[in-house]
Amino acid sequence: MTTSRQKLVIRNIGLILSGRTEKPILEGDCLVAEEGRILAWGAEKDLDIEGADTIVDANEVTLAPGLIDSHVHPVVGDYTPRQQQLNWIDSTLHGGVTTLISAGEVHMPGRPKDLVGLKAQAIAAQRWYENFRPSGMKVHAGAPIIEQGMEETDFKELADAGVKLLGEVGLGSVKDGRTARQMVDWARKYGIQSTIHTGGPSIPGSGLIDADMVLETGTDVIGHINGGHTALPDDQITCLCEKCQSALEIVHNGNERSALLALNTARELDKLGQVILGTDGPAGSGAQPLGILRMVAMLSTFGNVPAEVAFCFATGNTARRRNLDTGIIEAGRSADFVLMDQAQHAPGKTILESVQLGNLPGVGMTIIDGHICSEQSRNTPPAERLPCRLQP
């Protein structure tokens, strides 16, 4: 007895963005995925497209890996009490984002700060987003905020329970670099990735985290190097870019001038591969469904970065730094995509020219694990062309 395999074919693609800064554009007009994994891409005539369960006519629009938001603060389900807002994750999906990464569930009302409570919340958050994916979105959550009194056994317990992230170092009671470094090292020993708050206080109760503490702590990700909201002085941002091999995370909720400083410094140091993007929402400035697209366009136009490279900051760069199996067009990786085109009446001859002129593209479809999760976006400007689902 043979069993059918779930097969996706996307044909008539106009442009394929790879997610890799070293080769951001791929040749081909067709992509095939099976069982939620990329199988092959290239010229349609050279691919096995028979037996597809789902066929998408891209109508010559651009296919890119699904965008990744490296810095969000989810709470539970598709609700954020910070802004009393429902369905912010679904709205973010309509901005082309298919993966969210928690920097801590800090907006949970009554967030526990005792060791038993903080571990319980982290494990619960990891579980509920593992078991429930709002609108199909991948939400990597369960990111505890470190507090005074934690020991190595606490990190082992968290890792054994499936926790893979730390929330922003500095948002809890640990405020000195030496203590934070010891906890970050314990976390790393058990496979837990770390992020640090960078810059001035974001909300009452948080505090300044300067370059010295960032360097001493040695986290895997320098969270919002452009401030969240308040940025560090220029010389400290430049110092972090020069001295760190960590991911340099630039966020929508930060200082835009400082974002450009970090980008330009990274380019001068040949470190564009370390640049990743986040929104840092929902937060005091709200949820930003188009925040990642806006960051791509802003960095491209004001940072003078080719749009195809700027898209890598929100896809492959983040995937590599975050150890994700999405974000890059590569055989075996998750079949997570966004299909998009130049917005109607936007200047520029192509989608890439239009984005580099500062315009957002129109999202026509998102696909996660080979399944169509949304079609024409309700949030982006309308695209010149739209992909469509065909009957197999």
Image: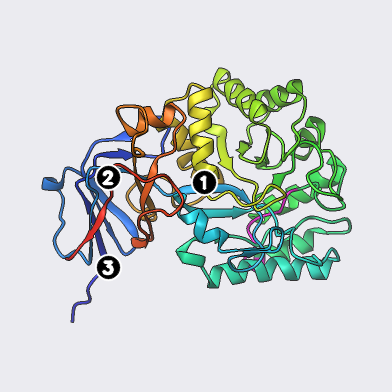
Q: Is residue 191 rendered magenta in the image?
A: no
- Residue drawn at x 54%, y 36% as measured from the top left: 295
Which residue reaches farthest top?
Answer: 268
Most foreground residue, 51 or 177: 51
Asked if the residue at tag 3 contacts the one at tag 1, i.e. Cβ–Cβ closer than 8 Å, the answer is: no
Tell me if mark 1 has few (under 14), some (14-19) or many (20+) residues whose alpha carbon lies within 10 angstroms of its own. many
Q: Which residues are magenta?
A: 160-168
Q: Which mark is residue 290?
A: 1
Which residue reaches farthest bottom?
Answer: 1
Kind of residue at badge 2: Arg
Mark toward the viewer: 3 or 2: 2
Q: Which mark is residue 385?
A: 2
The answer to whether 205 appears left or right of 300 in the picture is right
Where residue 60 appears, x then y in whole percent?
23, 42
Asked if the residue at tag 2 contacts the one at tag 1, i.e. Cβ–Cβ closer than 8 Å, the answer is: no
Where residue 132 appears, x then y in whole percent?
53, 71
From the image, which quarter does the C terminus lie in? bottom left
The answer to whether 311 appears left or right of 263 in the picture is left
From the image, which quarter does the N terminus lie in? bottom left
Q: Which mark is residue 6?
A: 3
Kind of residue at badge 3: Gln
Is tag 1's residue or tag 3's residue first in the polypeptide sequence? 3
Kind of residue at badge 1: Leu
Mark toward the viewer: 1 or 3: 1
